[in-house]
């Protein structure tokens, strides 16, 4: 599975969009990009995943570059409850060993 | 529609004692995974189980640690003769099928083990 790289921390003003980048330059054609978050040491929570196309759900949007070497998770209107550590993971079908790095610690400021 | 349940949420043991951590997967899920998280680190895979079978225990220390997922009842992670280095958060996840695409793992709230 491809290694992913994320900035260690970011701040975002409440109500503004939070854009969290992830580099996965060695990603292979059959690897999906998954995003999870961990709020205050709770269990990781699934957010969204994608392969090539941009994806959107009720929580977030995922923008994947055309070359698939990087992606951005967008929280359109960040709230204080979105303060968490966000993990970007590259997975192939059937992968069960999720490899969590240190992620990005997002702090939403009032 | 309960999610993944873990108990206890907090467990304190003295060195040398045994720790038993329980995990009930989401309804309809037959695949269980255990992860360990040390302070300020990401989660590390320990073991993957299906009912009555250990599929992959490559991330679990060979001594003192064991896991099971019986036909009936929760999955159990057992740590014998705990040491201070075992202090960590232990998370259980479950999936409807083998993990990965469209079979996302759903995580429980974790058990925080403190060894005195």
Image (cartoon, helix red, strand yellow):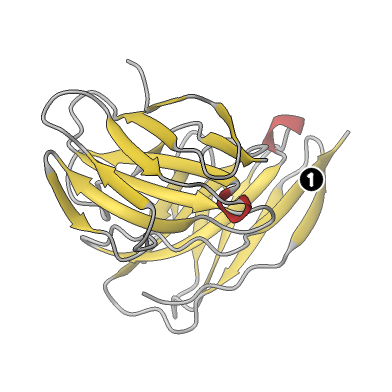
Q: Does residue B53 appear to the left or right of B14 in the view shown?
A: left
Q: Does residue A78 appear to the left or right of A98 in the view shown?
A: right
- Residue A39's spot in the image, x, y percent? 63, 38
- Residue A10's spot in the image, x, y percent? 78, 56
Quadrant in which the C terminus of chain B appears? top right
* Front residue of B46 and B100: B46
Residue located 21% across and 60% down the image:
A94
Residue located 27% across and 55% down the image:
B100
Q: Does residue B99 appear to the left or right of B81 in the view shown?
A: left
Task: Tell me which chain the residue with mark 1 is part of.
Answer: A
The residue most toward the front is B16
- Residue A74's spot in the image, x, y percent? 61, 50
The residue most toward the right is A110
- Residue B2's spot in the image, x, y percent? 35, 17
* Front residue of B59 and A60: B59
Residue located 51% across and 47% down the image:
B82
In the rendered image, the vertical position of residue A3 relative to residue A81, given as above or below: below
Residue located 50% across and 31% down the image:
B109
In the rendered image, the vertical position of residue B53 relative to residue A50, given as above or below: above
């Amino acid at each position: 599975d491809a290694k992913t790289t994320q900035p260690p921390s970011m701040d975002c003003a409440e109500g503004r969009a939070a854009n969290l980048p992830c580099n996965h330059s060695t990603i292979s054609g059959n690897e999906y990009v998954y995003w999870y978050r961990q709020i205050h040491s709770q269990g990781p929570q699934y957010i969204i995943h994608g392969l090539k196309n941009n994806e959107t759900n009720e929580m977030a949007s995922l923008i994947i570059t055309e070359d698939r070497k990087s992606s951005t998770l967008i929280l359109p209107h960040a709230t204080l409850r979105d303060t968490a550590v966000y993990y970007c993971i590259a997975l192939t079908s059937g992968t069960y060993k999720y490899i969590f790095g240190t992620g990005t610690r997002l702090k939403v400021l009032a | 529609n309960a999610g993944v349940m873990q108990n206890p949420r907090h467990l304190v043991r003295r060195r040398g004692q045994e720790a038993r951590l329980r995990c009930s997967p989401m309804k309809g899920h037959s695949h269980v995974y255990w992860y360990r998280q040390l302070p300020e680190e990401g989660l590390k895979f320990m073991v993957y189980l299906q009912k009555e079978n250990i599929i992959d225990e490559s991330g679990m220390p060979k001594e003192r640690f064991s896991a099971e997922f019986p036909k009936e009842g929760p999955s159990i992670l057992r740590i014998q003769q705990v040491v201070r280095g075992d202090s960590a958060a232990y998370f259980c996840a479950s999936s409807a099928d083998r993990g990965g695409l469209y079979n996302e793992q759903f995580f429980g709230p974790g058990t925080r083990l403190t060894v005195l």
